[in-house]
């Protein structure tokens, strides 16, 4: 289980968690300002498609973080919900809390929905944990919960066929495939591949984070006939700092040296399929795990073919 008391008492991190969760679930989200208890409320736009037309529903989201005390969220803590909803023209109200609402607050929300036509939802700690356990939001567990995330290293989904899976590992989303077996590759081998990638000294800018570079694993194919792995990785960098890019030959040397440093069991040196991608990392549409980094290459991931060419065949310089 996720221990929400890992988050600071002031509730700011909890508010950030809920906002990131909503964004990853595809909602347009922004802050309203200061909420009832000094925290910030969120406004969420839910775009719906009916039989005859499209329309939008607005939700007010109130974040209440009581996990450090363990107390339920009471009626006084949420203030005047009806008035707050009217002030921004919200059709519905979501209470996101790190514990649970009191019975009296649940009754009040039910009365509001019945008598005032305001839709109400409760995201208690159990509901939030369930939402964090989905493929597109799983990485937030590792971003916000350093201790609890140790219990959430892997989640695997049989997505396409008996030998092709989707998976979450730590903050990564990746595909796994096997040449013959209907069992996904040894997870400790994939963990080793991720560990090797994480040790590459790519450029990181602590002040201007948008100028940083990223090595992002996308898939691992296991040729169980020859005990070889193909690791599909994207090297993402912005134009502004492309002079900091590690060229393919040097990158292969670093990866090989890191592999030799540790005697990984059941593994030969992986084949590295690395795409060098110049991206506008400052764009609002940029997401490290956007579907466009995966969808064109699903067949390659499944059968173990190169997207363009393997790292040891590349000869260009940056």
Image: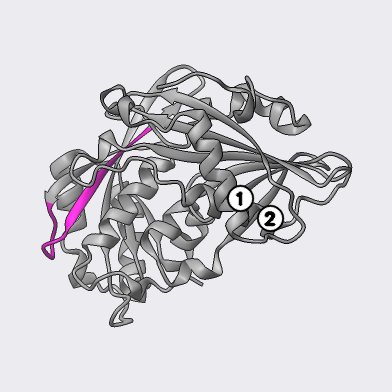
Which residue lies under the disc numbered 1? 193
Q: Are marks 2 and 1 in contact (CB under 8 Å)?
A: yes
Q: Residue at x 62, y 54 (%)?
A: 260
Q: Which segment is the magenta one? A: 34-46
Residue at disc 2, secondary structure? helix
Using the rendered view, name the quadrant where residue 57 is placed: top left
Does residue 71 sit above or below 305 in this rendering?
A: below
The image position of residue 209, as x and y in percent, is: 25, 41
Residue 111 appearing in the image: yes
Task: From the viewer's side, name the closer residue of 7 and 126.
Answer: 7
Residue at disc 1, secondary structure? helix
Does residue 208 sit above or below 10 in this rendering?
A: above
Residue 134 appearing in the image: no
Q: Which mark is residue 189?
A: 2
The image position of residue 205, as x and y in percent, is: 25, 42
Colouring of the image: one colour
Q: Residue at x 29, y 26 (%)?
A: 283
Q: Residue at x 34, y 48 (%)?
A: 20
Does residue 75 sit above or below 261 in this rendering?
A: below
* Magenta run includes residue 191: no
The image position of residue 177, as x and y in percent, is: 75, 41
Using the rendered view, name the quadrant where residue 274 is placed: top right
Q: Residue at x 16, y 60 (%)?
A: 39
Q: Is the residue marked by circle 1 packed among few (<14), some (14-19), or many (20+) residues within 10 Å?
A: many
Q: Quadrant of the C terminus?
A: top left
The image position of residue 73, as x and y in percent, is: 28, 72
Q: Is residue 200 left or right of residue 164?
A: left
Please identify the dominant SS of the magenta region: strand
Q: CA distance from mark 2 to mark 1?
A: 6 Å
């Amino acid at each position: 289980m996720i221990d929400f008391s890992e988050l600071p008492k002031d509730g700011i991190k909890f508010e950030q968690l809920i906002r990131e969760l909503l964004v990853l679930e595809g909602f347009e989200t922004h802050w309203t300002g200061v909420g009832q208890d000094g925290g910030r409320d969120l406004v969420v736009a839910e775009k719906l498609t009916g039989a005859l037309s499209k329309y939008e529903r607005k939700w007010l989201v109130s974040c209440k973080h009581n996990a450090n005390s363990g107390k339920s969220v009471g009626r006084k803590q949420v203030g005047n919900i009806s008035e707050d909803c009217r002030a921004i023209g919200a059709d519905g109200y979501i209470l996101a809390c790190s514990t649970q609402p009191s019975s009296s607050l649940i009754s009040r929300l039910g009365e509001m929905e019945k008598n005032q036509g305001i839709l109400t939802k409760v995201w208690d700690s159990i509901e939030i944990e369930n939402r964090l356990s989905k493929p597109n939001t799983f990485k937030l567990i590792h971003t916000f919960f350093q201790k609890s995330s140790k219990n959430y290293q892997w989640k695997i989904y049989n997505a396409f066929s008996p030998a092709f899976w989707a998976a979450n590992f730590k903050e990564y989303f990746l595909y796994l495939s096997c040449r013959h077996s209907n069992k996904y590759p040894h997870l400790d081998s994939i963990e080793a591949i991720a560990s090797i990638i994480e040790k590459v000294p790519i450029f990181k800018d602590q002040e201007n984070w948008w100028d940083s570079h990223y090595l992002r694993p996308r898939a691992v194919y296991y040729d169980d006939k020859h005990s070889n792995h193909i690791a599909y990785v994207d090297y993402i960098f912005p134009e502004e700092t492309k002079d900091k890019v590690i060229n393919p030959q040097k990158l292969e040397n670093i990866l090989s040296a890191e592999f030799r440093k540790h005697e990984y069991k059941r593994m030969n040196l992986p084949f590295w399929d690395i795409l060098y991608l110049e991206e506008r990392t400052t764009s609002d549409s940029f997401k490290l795990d956007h579907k466009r980094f995966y969808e064109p290459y699903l067949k390659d991931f499944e059968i173990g073919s190169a997207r363009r060419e393997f790292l040891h065949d590349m000869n260009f310089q940056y």
